[in-house]
Amino acid sequence: MENDIVLKTEDLTKHYGGVQALEGANFELKKGEHVAIMGDNGAGKSTFVRQITGVEQRTRGTVWLYGENVAFGGPLDAREAGIETVFQTLALADDLDVPDNLFLGREKTRLDWLGPFRLLDYKAMRRATIEGLEKTAVKIPNIRNTIRNMSGGQRQCVAIARTATFHSRLTIMDEPTAALGVQETAQVENIIRTLKEQGEPLILISHNMRQVFDLVDRIVVFRRGRICANLDIKNGDITGEDVVAYITGAKTQPEYQEAA
Amino acid sequence: MADTSHGTGGLSFDKSKRAWPNEANIFIALICIIGMFEILGQLLPYMNNQSFLFDTKDRFDSVFNEARLKIIILQVAIIGIIALGVTQVIISGGIDLSSGPLVGAAAMIVMSFAQTELVNGNPNPKAVFGDWAFDLPVLIPVVVGLLFGAFIGAINGSLIAFTGIPPFIATLGMFLVCRGIAQWWTRGQPVSFPTESFAWLGSGMMPVIWFLLLAVLFHFILRFTVYGKHTYAIGSNEDAARMSGINVKRHKVLVYMIASMLAAFAAIILSSKNLTAQSGMGQFYELFAIAMAVIGGVSLTGGRGSIIGTVLGAMVFGVIQSGFTYVKLDAFYQLMAMGAIIIGAVVLDQWRQKQAAARA
Ligand SMILES: Nc1ncnc2c1ncn2[C@@H]1O[C@H](COP(=O)(O)OP(=O)(O)OP(=O)(O)O)[C@@H](O)[C@H]1O
Ligand SMILES: [Mg+2]
């Protein structure tokens, strides 16, 4: 397998009991490429993400990361393999503060021989948090506030800062700007542009047509659990209306006929 | 990057912006309750102007009524040790109803390994095992007790983590199992006459010392270790904890094991203090321990609470219990009033959460 392919899935499938949430997804992401996944509510976008990131175990199919066949047992494995994800549910612990959440599951610690009772290095985590937030220009009034006391947008900022603070080999964002105001959306888009400049690959799930056309190289459309279109938008001959047609089912690319 | 109104300058660690700690409220409540009993003592006609808190007898030259204070902390110390474990279970989003019967079962088992051969020159009339089990070093009954606790906790935790049985049901089952073990162990006979070194563990104010030592230890563990952070994280949002890569199942097993080991340790101290073990020991302890935690601000929905809160909750619990006796409230009224207070604490917690949700 060629090495310039970051992520490849073949026949990736997930059934929940009788619900075919994801069916035979063949997907490819090249080095440095930014791809958007679009599709109506319930089309299977988040399900696709959960299969790649080890949150759930797939029903069928194969996933390669940088040419390596991977089957993550859990989210920690995916993270250790270099996949950073902003989940649609954000996956934040409400009663913990910002540094706690940024480092949840990979705390900076001392006296590691103490096993589960190893000590937290609060100072180092706080410092890294402030640096990380400054780098991403995410605004949070006081990082010692618990997530519970934050607005929806601030929560989303924390989740995004979490992925952006750590170096990653693949970043996935599931509707990262859904609850954000105009300024905050612009900031997240800037974070995404920075990733592009640094050559870091990204999968962006979004319902925002303008944003997608501004940011990414390619759009993959999901419909009822299947991929129905793979659209290169760099040369400008694809319009928003075309994408809508694929999303709603008015059009299907010939190579994806079985999805119709 | 543009620096807007609260821009990067706002990314601070600002101590002054920390919220008023809930523990302070509980401390104030504690003072108020003590004051209330003091006033009741002055007002109630049959009390003859006794004081709840202060020493009123001329024979002694202390300010406080030390005897009463000692009784209060001694009374709460042993259940308080259980409450330290229950606190962790509740913070992790669970509940443990098995701790009271576990105290009974563990006390019976522990005491069987702590017996002395000769009582006033006569053979021990309550001997459980043969000669080999007499006058063992004190470490043996302690280790046996802790292992038993760890075993019960591991079963609780595994049932909850791996089979998805709700904690309420799993530990309710264990409640009955442990009561059964306690009665089966000697077919209901009490086990008595421990060695001197074992009797020392719970003698005098030793239960209070153990309680405070363990409280400091677990305060530290919950605040400053990965174990503590993950316990809060799981209670806050289990899915988020899992997605963040925490091994939630393994962690739950560990939490229940620690809680049951603390209950077993309470059994060691209690049987040592009483110099005997009976199968019915620890009745209502699981509920009183939960009450201490809840009064201390540990939220039954998980994610919030602290050891300091629970220690204060234990003090409130002890003061109320002692105060009821002080104003000569009959025992059955005391139970009813305790029940009402526990319900009140949960209602208050839910009301606080609604307030918090409304603010967010
Ligand atoms: N745990 C689950 N159990 C059963 N069905 C599920 C589960 N998770 C998702 N589904 C179903 O799978 C389908 C795909 O859901 P998914 O969350 O992937 O949609 P989505 O494309 O992310 O939608 P949205 O734009 O609303 O986020 C839906 O029909 C959903 O109801
Ligand atoms: Mg989704």
Image (cartoon, coloured by chain):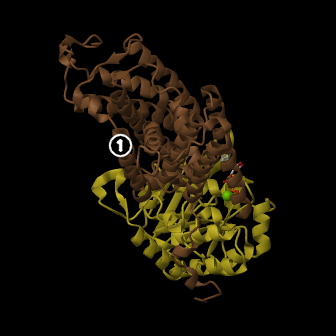
Chain colours: A yellow, B brown
Image quadrant assignment for residue B142? top left
Q: Residue at x 60, y 27 (%)?
A: B331
**Is residue A225 found left or right of B201 in the rendered image?**
right
Image quadrant assignment for residue A188? bottom right
Q: Secondary structure at mark 1?
A: helix
Compared to B234, does B323 lie above or below? above
Q: Position of residue B96 (x, y in %)?
A: 52, 35
Q: Residue at x 20, y 19 (%)?
A: B134
Q: Position of residue A225 (x, y in %)?
A: 68, 52
Chain under numbered label 1: B
Q: Residue at x 81, y 61 (%)?
A: A250
**Between A252 and A178, which is closer to the camera in this rendering?**
A178
Compared to B272, does A121 lie above or below? below
Q: Residue under circle 1?
A: B210
**Is residue A85 found left or right of A119 in the rendered image?**
right
Compared to B270, does A66 lie above or below? below
Q: Position of residue B8 (x, y in %)?
A: 56, 84
Note whether residue B323 is visible.
Answer: yes
